[in-house]
Image (cartoon, rainbow, N blue to C red):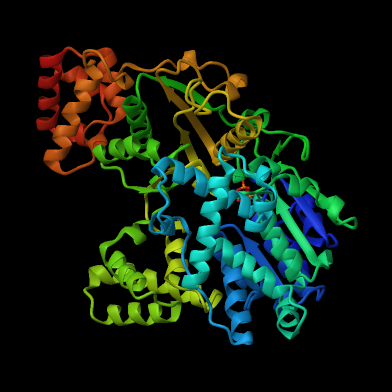
């Protein structure tokens, strides 16, 4: 058992107050204020002081990776098995399996979503309409509406032709029931019905959730909240929730930030504590992000760290030039000793990531796209995961399979398989009834461990993570938010998304855009227009190639020849210096450059000078 006083060490006074406060408790917390630290210390502190019991406590996170992190930290803090930790879906699936076993009922087969069924049901919908209808059905279900409530009140549907949607919904429900299938939303609904039962089954399940801790509460939807209320037996006195209203970014998934504001009305005895200090970012970055946030609930966020540089704003000529800028900036920082893994390039949409990836590949910069870890993309791991998927394996079977594979593999392939086994074994410990889907999700969400790679991902996927140097692309006046005339709610969500993205940086933040945008997004009007950072020649990508572009082509060609990263042939700093100063002889060139390989190789210096003379 952990020593309770030790669990309060290293916490700020605000954080300590949140750890020891009486439940039910709402912690309204700023970005970078140490939510995970507070939540895990609170759970451990309450168990250590015997205010709660671990066997009747449940911690809920939004992603498997976050749940994994909470469980890992609790294991350390408690020096023993932690309480149940999981996502809404993994915990609900556990309830469905347990409740069904107690009732002697078969568990319906789980499908990711019902979208795939639509095609077989004879609906002649265009692909675009089908997507819109399906997204709206899911939003309505997450808001707690079912087929009956839609039939009674078609006005709930917010897209044209509600009767078509109701008919699709009704056919889907019939198809799922006929084929004994459940999708992820059904899992939440069935779990809620089970825990609300007025019999021994309901009672046994409710015993598990006397104390419940929910992270990222701003993203909870009404369906999820209903499950928790019923699981706690409608006695919410043991509830702790932590969230940041400025980071609510899942409106499309039915989440409702108003649930956070209205919690005090639902629970009159609610205690409220604020964590308003950001420990992550420098003061300059906190000052830049503050005006993007809404301060109604939390007030202005304070910075714990002093000083720092304001975000750098850069205009570029094209999407390709912006991607080159991203790659060059990373190469330059790495050249100065910054590990790749402490840098990230973030964009609003997945589509915007492709040119970034291309530019990074050209400079041989190791990167991880969308959090797909090098582990998850290793062929030997892909092969094992494919078998797990085809055979729909449970976590115990996956562990056995990986162990078996390890016995008959080469040393090079063994390294990744060993990490896979480590991850799968930990998942089995945390969630013995997890399956291949859970492992797949976990592999996707894990921050790259022990591998030096730049993260390239979307704003949504960057939530909860941090890097020393962050570059946000596509933040121009004509590109962010992407559509004009968005409804007020959607615009507010885009603002919060930008806030999430900006607050991922600990030390430096670069924000760029490309034509037709000529200035940064209007959401950043407080940061100035960025003319002082007008693009250098090397990041202009149209018109006659500049000297910098030609030198870049030269170094890429030489790098290919020598199978080296191009910045090792000629660093960005040297490239810009040469393009600006254009040395007239080889001696001046050598006196000017600092790229080690160039300084040490007369042959390379000769070739570079010849190239300069040819194009200059
Ligand atoms: N009391 C503290 N003293 C020093 N550093 C702290 C303290 N609390 C948290 N930190 C550090 O601040 C950083 C942000 O913490 P954390 O990631 O838990 O924040 P968060 O509230 O979850 O942020 P977000 O919601 O923006 O993802 C981490 O590097 C963490 O180690």
Image coordinates for residue 320, horizontal then vertical, percent: 31, 27
Residue at point 71%, 59% (across, down): 225
Where, by quadrant of the figure, is residue 375 drawn? Answer: bottom left
Query: In the displayed structure, does residue 570 sit left or right of residue 158?
Result: left
Image coordinates for residue 43, horizontal then vertical, percent: 72, 67
Which quarter of the rendered picture does the C terminus lie within?
top left
Residue at point 45%, 46% (across, down): 130
Residue 142 visible in the displayed image: yes
Query: In the displayed structure, does residue 332 sit left or right of residue 170?
Result: left
Residue at point 85%, 62% (across, down): 22
Q: Nearer the viewer, residue 387 or 25?
A: 387
Residue 6 visible in the displayed image: no
Instruction: Count the numbered circles shown.
Output: 0
Image coordinates for residue 6, horizontal then vertical, percent: 73, 67
Query: In the displayed structure, does residue 380 sit left or right of residue 445?
Result: left
Placement of 56 over or under 310, stated as above or below: below
Image coordinates for residue 247, horizontal then vertical, percent: 64, 43
Residue at point 29%, 35% (across, down): 359
Q: Nearer the viewer, residue 202 or 116?
A: 116
List the single residue furthest toward the right. 269
Placement of 313 over or under 372, stated as above or below: above
Placement of 92 over or under 123, stated as above or below: below
């Amino acid at each position: 058992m952990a020593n309770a006083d030790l669990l309060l060490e290293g916490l700020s006074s605000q954080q300590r107050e949140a750890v020891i406060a009486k439940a039910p408790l709402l912690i309204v917390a700023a970005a970078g204020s140490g939510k995970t630290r507070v939540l895990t210390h609170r759970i451990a502190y309450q168990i250590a002081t015997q205010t709660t019991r671990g066997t009747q406590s449940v911690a809920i996170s939004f992603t498997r990776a976050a749940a994994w992190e909470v469980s890992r930290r609790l294991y350390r803090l408690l020096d023993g098995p932690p309480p149940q930790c999981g996502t809404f879906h993994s915990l609900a699936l556990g309830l469905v399996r347990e409740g069904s076993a107690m009732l002697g009922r078969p568990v319906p087969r789980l499908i990711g979503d019902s979208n795939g069924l639509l095609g077989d049901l004879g609906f002649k919908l265009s692909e675009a309409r089908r997507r819109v209808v399906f997204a709206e059905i899911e939003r309505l279900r997450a808001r707690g509406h079912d087929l009956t409530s839609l039939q009674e009140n078609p006005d709930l549907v917010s897209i044209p032709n509600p009767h078509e949607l109701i008919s699709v919904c009704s056919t889907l429900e019939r198809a799922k029931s006929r084929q004994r299938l459940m999708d992820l939303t059904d899992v939440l609904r069935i779990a809620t019905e089970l825990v609300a039962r007025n019999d021994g089954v309901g009672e046994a399940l409710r015993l598990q959730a006397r104390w419940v801790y929910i992270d990222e509460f701003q993203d909870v939807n009404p369906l999820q909240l209903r499950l928790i209320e019923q699981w706690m037996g409608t006695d919410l006195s043991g509830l702790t929730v932590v969230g940041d209203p400025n980071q609510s970014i899942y409106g499309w998934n039915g989440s409702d930030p108003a649930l956070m504001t209205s919690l005090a009305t639902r629970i009159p005895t609610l205690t409220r504590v604020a964590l308003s200090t950001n420990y992550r970012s420098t003061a300059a970055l906190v000052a830049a992000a503050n005006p993007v946030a809404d301060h109604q609930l939390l007030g202005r966020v304070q910075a714990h760290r002093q000083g720092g540089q304001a975000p750098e704003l850069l205009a570029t000529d094209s999407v390709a030039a912006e991607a080159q800028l991203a790659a060059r900036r990373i190469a330059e920082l790495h050249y100065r000793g910054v590990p790749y893994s402490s840098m990230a390039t973030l964009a609003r949409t997945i589509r915007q990531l492709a040119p970034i990836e291309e530019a990074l590949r050209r400079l041989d910069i190791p990167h991880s796209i969308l959090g797909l870890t090098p582990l998850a993309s290793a062929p030997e791991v892909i092969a094992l995961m494919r078998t797990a998927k085809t055979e729909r394996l449970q976590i115990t079977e996956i562990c056995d399979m990986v162990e078996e594979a390890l016995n008959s593999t080469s040393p090079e392939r063994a390294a990744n398989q060993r990490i896979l086994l480590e991850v799968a074994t930990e998942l089995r410990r945390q969630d013995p009834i997890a399956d291949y889907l859970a492992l797949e999700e976990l592999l996707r969400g894990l921050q790259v461990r022990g591998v030096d790679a730049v993260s390239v991902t979307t704003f949504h996927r960057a939530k909860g993570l941090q890097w020393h140097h962050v570059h946000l692309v596509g933040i121009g006046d004509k590109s962010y938010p992407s559509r004009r005339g968005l409804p007020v709610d959607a615009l507010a969500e885009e603002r919060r998304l930008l806030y999430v993205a900006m607050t991922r940086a600990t030390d430096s933040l670069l924000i760029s855009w490309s034509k037709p945008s000529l200035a940064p997004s209007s959401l950043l009007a407080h940061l100035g227009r960025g003319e002082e950072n007008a693009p250098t020649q090397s990041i202009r990508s149209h018109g006659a190639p500049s000297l910098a572009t030609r030198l870049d082509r030269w170094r890429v060609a030489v790098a290919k020849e020598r199978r080296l990263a191009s910045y090792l042939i000629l660093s960005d700093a040297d490239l810009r210096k040469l393009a600006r100063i254009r040395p007239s002889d080889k001696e001046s060139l050598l006196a000017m450059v600092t790229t080690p390989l160039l300084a040490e190789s007369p042959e390379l210096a000769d070739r570079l000078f010849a190239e300069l003379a040819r194009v200059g």
